[in-house]
């Protein structure tokens, strides 16, 4: 009886899968403030040529540079695990598998893209990167990449997470990054927010504005983003590519593939390689699980909006709650984003991907059950995928269907124990973001002719 399915280093993917090649229709282009598609020259102000090419490429397979694969081999391929004890606890006929991305040095899936992003900047002559982070998983991963490629890294960390997750901040600093609580008084974007609300808890949109502003004004600095963009989703597809090989070894194919959704990178990583099968006619459900307190896919609108709070980024067509939406300070800080990956948004809009919103207490209940059965304490972000999987497993118990479920464990929760402590003490509560507040935030959407 095999529980852990491992691949040798020789099975590390050699190419990234590009879902754009199999979309039902071409993706809507990023737009500038003039309402016209953004030129590649405009993107070059903050991104290196290699990443710009990947952002717009329609090629189905893009080769992974050997220098990048050499670093990824430090922890990849990651294990695929059959969650038998969780199945037993749920008394379900479903088979539950999870891809364990928590085994990376940074404890999450994020280095899958931080390494190639740093690499493409390095070969373009850039030695300094600015970025944002919510929960800190991305900031830690880019700090790690900075160490591997001898680059300076500055991180604007959402203020509420800066206070909630001090050890992620310490880990970034251990790997040499500068870390600041956003909004700061170091940028015009930050000062503008603080003038309106000196006690602002911050948001990913605000932190993105600060990092992009710095990249625009410093020639030695580019911007790096941990989710949302096409090239980020592309880099994460190593997760699903490996999972497909491992599931074949297990003699199984998933009926349902699940990942948590904030900006969309880990969900894209596990789901996009299976979307390729779905586009070719295979029956498989793809479900993105988001917080009910930041429900961009389930309550947002599909339209053009800025990726940041102050309008420094191009406008992208995506599901959005409005770029000045400031979500509550839930502990799943990596999911507190007003928008969503344009590629995932398009596929949800086209009916190829499903989305569910899950309350905070249900996610922590799921995380606790997972920790007590599978012995891994999951990050609060990952508990959304676990909760959605448990919902599906319980439906299988009701119907008697022995479905196969696969989810992405995007990271561990070792630096999130304060959140678990609050849950165990009964101090956490659910927060359904008021529809009136969402409607008000959507009032500020940009107008595209």
Image (tube, rainbow, N blue to C red):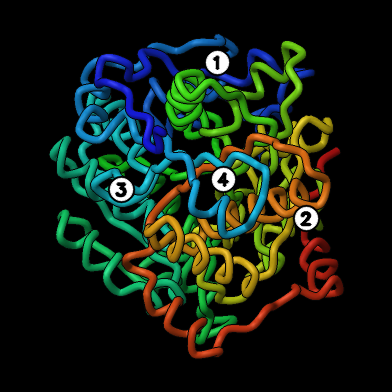
Asked whether the beta carbons under mark 4 and mark 2 sit within 8 Å of each other, the answer is: no
Q: Secondary structure at mark 1?
A: loop
Say whether disc 3 or disc 4 marks the residue closer to the N-terminus: 3
Say which of 210 and 5 sits in front: 5
Q: Position of residue 394 (x, y in %)?
A: 72, 54
Nearer to us of marks 4 and 1 is 1
The numbered disc on residue 57 is 1
Q: Residue at 75% across / 35% down in the picture?
A: 353
Quarter assignment of residue 316:
top right
Q: Secondary structure at mark 2?
A: loop
Say whether disc 4 or disc 1 marks the residue closer to the N-terminus: 1
Q: Residue at 31% across / 51% down in the picture?
A: 107
Nearer to us of marks 1 and 2 is 1
Which quadrant is home to the C terminus? top right
Per the image, the residue denoted by label 3 is 141
Q: Residue at 55% across / 70% down in the picture?
A: 364
Q: Position of residue 174 (x, y in %)?
A: 15, 60
Q: Position of residue 186 (x, y in %)?
A: 35, 68
Say whether disc 3 or disc 1 marks the residue closer to the N-terminus: 1
Mark 3 Cα within 10 Å, few/some/many (few <14, many 20+)?
many
Q: Residue at 81% across / 52% down in the picture?
A: 398
Asked whether the beta carbons under mark 4 and mark 1 sit within 8 Å of each other, the answer is: no
From the viewer's perspective, is 149 left or right of 385?
left
Asked whether the beta carbons under mark 3 and mark 2 sit within 8 Å of each other, the answer is: no
Say whether disc 4 or disc 2 marks the residue closer to the N-terminus: 4
Between the C-alphas of marks 3 and 2, the distance is 32 Å
Say which of 265 and 202 sits in front: 265
Per the image, the residue denoted by label 2 is 445
Q: Position of residue 95 (x, y in %)?
A: 60, 39
Say which of 305 and 405 sits in front: 405
């Amino acid at each position: 009886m095999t529980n852990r399915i491992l691949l040798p280093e020789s099975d590390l993917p050699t190419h990234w899968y590009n879902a754009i090649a199999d979309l039902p229709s071409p993706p809507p282009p990023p737009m500038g403030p003039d309402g016209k598609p953004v030129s590649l020259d405009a993107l070059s102000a903050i991104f290196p040529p290699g990443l710009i090419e990947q952002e717009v490429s329609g090629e189905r397979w893009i080769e992974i540079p050997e220098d990048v694969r050499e670093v990824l081999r430090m922890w990849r391929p990651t294990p695929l695990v059959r969650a038998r004890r969780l199945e037993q606890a749920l008394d379900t006929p479903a088979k539950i598998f999870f891809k364990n991305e928590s085994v990376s040095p940074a404890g999450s899936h994020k280095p899958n893209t931080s390494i190639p992003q740093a690499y493409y900047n390095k070969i373009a002559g850039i030695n300094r990167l600015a970025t944002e982070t919510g929960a800190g998983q991305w900031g830690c991963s880019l700090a790690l990449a900075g160490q591997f490629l001898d680059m300076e890294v500055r991180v604007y960390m959402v203020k509420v997470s800066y206070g909630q997750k001090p050890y992620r901040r310490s880990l970034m600093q251990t790997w040499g990054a500068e870390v600041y609580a956003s909004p700061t008084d170091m940028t015009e974007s930050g000062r503008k927010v603080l003038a309106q609300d000196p006690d602002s808890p911050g948001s990913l949109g605000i932190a993105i504005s600060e990092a992009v502003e710095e990249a625009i004004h410093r020639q030695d600095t580019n911007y790096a983003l941990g989710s949302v963009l096409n090239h980020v989703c592309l880099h994460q597809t190593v997760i699903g590519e490996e999972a497909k090989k491992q599931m074949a070894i297990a003699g199984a194919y998933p009926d349902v593939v699940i990942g948590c959704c904030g900006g969309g990178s880990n969900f894209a990583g596990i789901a996009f390689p299976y979307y390729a099968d779905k586009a070719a006619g295979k029956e498989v459900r793809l479900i993105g699980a988001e917080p009910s307190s930041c429900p961009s896919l389930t309550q947002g609108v599909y339209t053009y909006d800025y990726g940041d709070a102050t309008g420094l980024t191009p406008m992208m067509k995506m599901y959005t709650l409005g770029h000045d939406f400031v979500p509550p300070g839930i502990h799943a800080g990596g999911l507190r984003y007003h928008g969503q990956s344009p590629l995932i948004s398009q596929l949800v809009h086209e009916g190829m991907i499903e989305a569910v919103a899950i309350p905070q207490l249900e996610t922590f209940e799921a995380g606790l059950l997972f920790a007590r059965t599978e012995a891994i304490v999951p990050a609060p972000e990952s508990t959304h995928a676990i909760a959605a999987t448990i919902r599906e497993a319980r439906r299988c118990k009701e119907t008697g269907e022995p479905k196969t479920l696969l989810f992405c464990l995007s990271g561990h929760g070792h630096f999130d124990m304060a959140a678990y402590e609050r849950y165990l003490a009964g101090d956490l509560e659910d927060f359904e973001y008021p529809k009136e507040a969402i409607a008000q935030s959507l009032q500020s959407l940009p107008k595209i002719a």
